[in-house]
């Protein structure tokens, strides 16, 4: 199973991001979506789970939850925009993967039994941080993350 993970699009859905997400079994957006058309475009590729970011304050985002829990490929994923606001204990709640955004810094870090995955920002460049996206491959109940830089 291949899960595409994208965040911090801030209203910009790059063609390279769309191309990367083709063929995904599911997509998770880690917030700061910026425009409802991004959700439509992503949902046209694969089933979509999205969470609201701190910049998603317009009326269209009222229906986007602040957190999401999903079970895929035998694993439990928890999505939230800002990891600093994590309202649960991932270990106690048997979460396998925590997906976040907000920092614009790509991260794939295993901390005990929990994988923390931030795809970075796929939207407008912020400072000198990379434009990036991620995928999560799930096979045999194990998650393998891959961070990918987009463009130059």
Image (cartoon, rainbow, N blue to C red):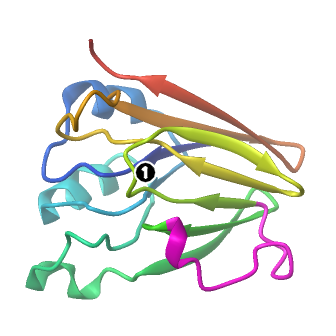
Task: Identify the residue at image location x=15%, y=79%.
Answer: 57
Bin the neighbour count of mark 1 within 10 Å (Cα to Cα): few under 14, some 14-19, many 20 and up.
Answer: some
Can residue 1 be seen by looking at this rendering?
A: no
37 relative to 70, above or below: above
Q: Which residue is mark 1?
A: 46
Quadrant in the picture for the C terminus = top left
Quadrant in the picture for the N terminus = top right
Nearer to me, 34 or 71: 34
Image spot of residue 143 (x, y percent):
77, 44
Q: Which residues are magenta?
A: 83-96
Q: Mostly what secondary structure, the magenta segment?
A: loop
Location of residue 150 by image quarter = top left
* Image-based side of 23 in relation to 18, left or right: right
Image spot of residue 121 (x, y percent):
33, 42
Location of residue 145 by image quarter = top right
Q: What is the number of callouts on the image?
A: 1
Task: Identify the residue at image location x=41%, y=35%.
Answer: 21
Can residue 30 be seen by looking at this rendering?
A: yes
User: Is-magenta flag for residue 91?
Assistant: yes
Say what secondary structure mark 1 lies in: loop
Image spot of residue 61 (x, y percent):
20, 79
Task: Identify the residue at image location x=22%, y=41%.
Answer: 123
Location of residue 16 by image quarter = top left
User: Is-magenta flag for residue 48?
Assistant: no
Image spot of residue 22 (x, y percent):
40, 33
Q: Residue furthest front?
A: 127
* Image-based side of 139 in relation to 15, left or right: right
92 relative to 27, above or below: below
38 relative to 90, above or below: above
């Amino acid at each position: 199973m291949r899960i595409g993970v994208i965040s911090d699009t801030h209203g910009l859905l790059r063609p390279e991001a769309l191309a990367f997400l083709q063929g995904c079994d599911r997509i998770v957006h880690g917030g700061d979506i910026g425009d409802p058309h991004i959700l439509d475009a992503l949902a046209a590729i694969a089933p979509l789970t999205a969470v609201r970011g701190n910049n998603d304050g317009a009326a269209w985002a009222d229906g986007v939850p602040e957190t999401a829990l999903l079970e895929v490929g035998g694993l439990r994923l928890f999505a939230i925009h800002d990891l600093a606001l994590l309202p649960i204990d991932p270990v106690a709640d048997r979460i396998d993967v925590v997906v976040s955004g907000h920092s614009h810094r790509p991260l794939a870090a295993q901390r005990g039994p929990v994988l923390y995955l931030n795809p970075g920002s796929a939207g407008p460049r912020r400072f000198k941080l990379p434009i990036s996206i991620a995928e999560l491959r799930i096979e045999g109940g194990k998650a393998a993350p891959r961070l990918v830089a987009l463009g130059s």
